[in-house]
Image (spheres, helix red, strand yellow):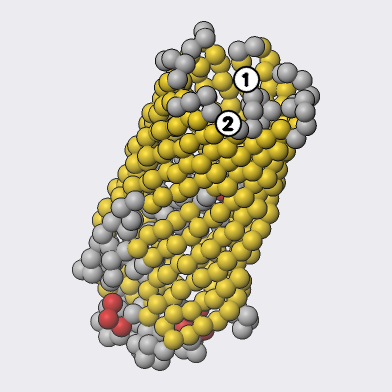
Amino acid sequence: MPFLTRPQGQMGVNALHLTSDFRDDGSDATTTLSGGAVDLNNTGDGGNPYSPVEAVPNLFVAAPANESGSVWVGLGVTAPFGLSSQYKEGWFGRYDSTSSDLRVIDISPAVAFKPSERLTFGGGLNIQRVDADLRRAIPDPLEAGGPTPQRDGELILEGHSLAIGVNAGMIYKPWEHTRVAAHYRSEVNHRLTGNLKGRTPTGLGGGVNFLVTGEAALDLPQIATVALAQDIGSRMTVMAHAMWFGWDSFQEIRMALDNGGSLSDPQGYENSVTAALGAEYKASDRLTLRTGMQYDETPTTGDNRTTRTPDGNRIWVSGGLSYNITDRITADFAGTYMFIDEGHVDRTATFDPLYTLFGAPGAAATVNTQSTTESSVGILGMAVNYKF
């Protein structure tokens, strides 16, 4: 912030268009009365689970806190993590997921200090609100011949949490046209309070509604970033950054129920890295052009990858521009397309602990969800900056 010349604010929005196409690779279910593994591939592919457009807004403001401009304060409001999907009813992966809605809102007050013309450093808080609604079907273990959508139950995990993390960073100018930066954001440990609810399968109570209160852990990763910007002449700047995500903190979603029971949904995330190269060119006093590419490693693994996040390694290709409408108002536009590797899901879920919760400890069901997904993401972003 102290490298800015005057107070300013920015409002923006990113419009995401996501598509995924699932192919069944041999998903099956074995239950108490199924007589062996039953193929699930005759119940539909789920369709594209994502909305045509998902809008993600953001807001930033910054202003000096003293007359010399050596101390600045600011505020950012973003949505750093999120998930929203809805599969067609009765699809082959329904015992892994049917719908997901996870939203993280991050409010980040910050302060920065500029002790010299070459150095600025600062830090702030990450005040996060999480709201989650995760759903999947429950197979009927007492259905002869194997489970069908008509006799399925439903399991819903819903909860919310408010938690706080910290961040700190610095920018250093070793030479007039060179800037290096480093930033660290801590892990944020959420404890979602809410309900485990839904309805039992037909064979276990005839579709009776149930509700149990409890608490679930959700640990969002620590992130470390290093970056470089180098001016080449008076119009061109080249940039690079690398980021490390400590996703190994996200091993499971475990819900501790107030009745003494517990349920676990394994995730098995691994640490991941991202690296990017970019450039911007000042075409005129009003127009700046930008382009860049990024390699983005997925934290999901084959053994624990789920149909909620059928992710793969990604390559981002981006372009954009800034246009100074007046001395105070600037408009930014950007477009990104992601090339995503095939995602393979090979996941086994056992429903016996859930049946015990329903008072049927002898019932059993094991579901193997196996699929391949091809996905793509397109993003259009725009923002308006105002200098006060």
142 is higher (above) or lower (below) than 307: below
Who is closer to the viewer here, 275 or 39? 275
In this rendering, would 318 be left or right of 123?
Answer: left
Q: Is residue 381 visible?
A: yes
Tell me whether circle 1 and circle 2 mark residues in contact (CB < 8 Å).
no
For the point 46% across and 73% down, the residue is: 156
Q: How many marks?
A: 2
For the residue carrying disc 2, how many other residues have a C-alpha within 10 Å: few (<14), some (14-19), or many (20+)?
some
For the point 37% across and 87% down, the residue is: 207
Picture quarter with the N terminus: top right
Measuring from the top left, give residue 319's x and y in whole percent: 38, 28
For the point 55% across and 69% down, the residue is: 159
Tag 2 residue: 387
Q: Is residue 223 visible?
A: no
Element type at mark 2: strand
282 is higher (above) or lower (below) than 381: above
Q: Nearer the viewer, mark 1 or mark 2?
A: 2
In this rendering, would 23 be left or right of 367?
Answer: left
> Whole-Å distance between the Cαs marked 1 and 2?
23 Å
Question: Which residue is most to the bottom?
Answer: 205
Question: Which residue is most to the top?
Answer: 233
Tag 1 residue: 179
For the point 56% across and 54% down, the residue is: 105
Give amino acid for label 2.
Answer: Lys
Measuring from the top left, give residue 383's x and y in whole percent: 46, 37
Mark drawn on residue 136 = none
